[in-house]
Image: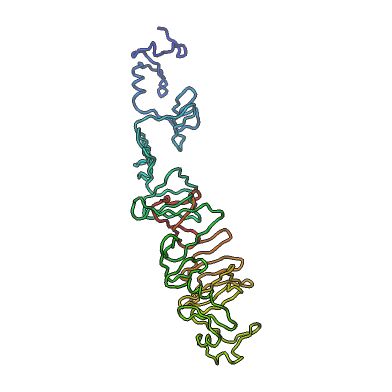
Amino acid sequence: MANLKISELTALTGANSAADDLVVIVDTSAAQTKKMTRAELVAALTSGNFTFLDSSGATDNRLVFGAGTDLSIYHDGSNSHIEDGGTGALKITTSQLEVLGTGETLAKFIDDGAVELYHDNTKKFETTSAGATLTGALTTTGAIVVGGDLTVNGTTTTVNSNTIEITNSFTFEGSTADNNELVLSAGDPTADRTVTLPDATTTLVGTDATQTLTNKTIDATQLSGTVANARLDAQLQDVAGLATTDGGFIVGNGSNFVLESGSTARDSLGLGSAALSAASSFVAVSGDAMTGNLTFGDNNKAVFGTGSDLEVFHNGTNSIIEGKTGDLILRTVGSESILLTDAGGNNLAQFNDNSDVKLYHNANEKLATTSSGVTVTGTVAATALTGDGSGITGLSSGVSAGFAIAMAVAL
């Protein structure tokens, strides 16, 4: 065999190579050309590690697969990369793929099973045959869209939103799971309607059942039939049936209304004949001014308007200002406010000209209107909600048809 340069040697291919064929190796450390068999070369390449230095570009220190550099594995000095830069998808085939951190699990992908996501080595999310299971709270910055039924199993579901829209009806199961539910439904309104709940623990009264009312003020014009223990119908009929007489008085005698002459009425009212005999005791019909108090007994009224449109009276228990025609308007002149206070001078409500309206609880401000809506301090409890919840944000959990809802709404 003649001596040839390396460039003059015939290429050794798999088809014509044998284990004892010699391979020329250049030993750069000794500046020598050496030989080794193909079997020795294969053994050297298949034992130990292949070491690649940090890659500074696509042409150095990378493990490359594919005719067009389709897949590359390398480290750039900061991060490790598995880079699919060619055609098709990057497929990882295994019966179970686990993504691990330093001593903990980050994610699992199980063949014919679940996909699991972890936080600090604790499973928080997994897919199931029925959907998915979330352990813990779900926080979103956008709308949550639910295409099917939403069931929440818990004690209290809190929704912090000014408005919740529910289509058609809202159903309460009650404490016993059975076929009997309470359904709150709305008809097809022709305009926006508002139902305001009182700031009190109370019972709503329906029209289809006999209800007992205690310590309630009722507008008689809205009633039909008889009112037990009040004889309201009979008394109104008595008043309407009384013939008017010049100088006569309609007086309640404790069980009915009667028409009395001037002298009899004075005695019934406890005025006596002498009380009305002196001209100084009278106030002129027009233009006069009183210098003392005008005192009315229980259920005796100060009546204003041609049709008795406004009445002010005390019924023995409560003081009542009752407007029967038109709106009841409280008006202040200038920039002054209208205040409702308790006996101690603490604010109950404050109405400010060209500004806000404030509502209080135990002298503490709880609700104030603003130019964009209302601001509520604390929690407002509501027994009815409307809407589909598409604008709800920041939910700690969903809304359930079977549980009470505590939410911040403007009443």
The colour scheme used here is: rainbow
**Residue 101: quadrant of the picture:** top left
| Residue with the most extreme right position | 287
State the image coordinates of residue 281 (x, y, percent, origin top left). 59, 89
User: Eyeballing the image, is 224 above or below 342?
Assistant: above
State the image coordinates of residue 136 (x, y, percent, origin top left). 38, 49
Q: Foreground: 237 or 92?
A: 237
User: Eyeballing the image, is 53 above or below 255?
Assistant: above
User: Eyeballing the image, is 386 above or below 377?
Assistant: above
**Residue 155: quadrant of the picture:** bottom left
Number of numbered discs present?
A: 0
**Residue 79: quadrant of the picture:** top left
| Residue with the most extreme top position | 1
Q: Residue at x 34, y 51 (%)?
A: 178
User: Eyeballing the image, is 128 above or below 204?
Assistant: above
State the image coordinates of residue 25 (x, y, percent, origin top left). 40, 18
State the image coordinates of residue 192 (x, y, percent, origin top left). 55, 56
| Side of 286 relative to 35 (left or right) | right
| Side of 370 relative to 67 (left or right) | right
Q: Foreground: 231 or 183?
A: 231
Q: Foreground: 58 or 181?
A: 181
Image quadrant in which the N terminus is located: top left
Q: Residue at x 63, y 83 (%)?
A: 285
Q: Residue at x 53, y 85 (%)?
A: 265
